[in-house]
Image: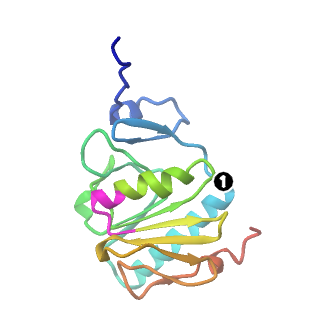
Amino acid sequence: MPLLEEKTYTIEDIYHLSDGERAELIHGQLYMMAPPSYVHQTLSMEIAGTIRDYIRRNRGRCQVLSAPLAVNLNADDKTYVEPDISVICDRNKISDKGIQGAPDFIVEIVSPSSRKMDYSTKNAIYADAGVREYWIVDPLKKRTTVYYYEQDAAPMIVPFDQPVTVGIYGDLQITISRLLQDFDL
């Protein structure tokens, strides 16, 4: 008896989703995405704003972009992700369709439905694609897991009340709890 064939999806399938539906595509498999929560969006805006302000103050060339934004990690049609925050220093990777290739720095904010994806699947594909730095911001555990892939070092786990150094810059530190102090979270 023949084995059942698993369908392989492409970016074209992402573009044909119904309005309001969001999904990511990893190695040809679709992963539907739930809408983000208030906490998730607040963290995303505050972290992205902090990085954007740093770049502007220092007249940097990098650009910080937030989801939803297509990131085609390997510039193929089988992997399409929407990181919560992407920092891209090579402006040639930016097009109207999104990002073609690996961002320098990615931040994912963990939601209950994304936990396994953020900690496992995305960690592996981001490392393989050439992302330099990856943060997993976990509101439930109140900690950030930091991967400095370029340094080939073990991940660091940093509680929200302690500063985390943005490795691609070295002199930018973010303390997540300070970003949230003005919000009822």
Quick one: 152 or 148, which is closer to the camera? 152
Q: Magenta segment range?
A: 126-133
Q: At numbered mark 1, what does the secondary structure look like: helix, strand or loop?
A: loop
Which residue ends up furthest to the bottom in the rendered image? 171
Residue 26 falls left or right of residue 21? left
Q: Quadrant of the C terminus?
A: bottom right
Would you say residue 102 is visible in this rendering? no
Q: Quadrant of the N terminus?
A: top left
Residue 31 falls left or right of residue 132? right
What is the three-letter code of the residue carrying label 1? Ser
Residue 121 falls left or right of residue 59? right
Q: Is residue 146 above or below residue 81?
A: below
Position of residue 68 measured from the top left corner of the image (x, y, whole percent):
48, 50
Q: Is residue 21 above or below residue 59?
A: above
Would you say residue 87 is visible in this rendering? yes
Position of residue 130 measured from the top left corner of the image (x, y, whole percent):
27, 62
Name which residue lies at 59% across and 64% down.
138
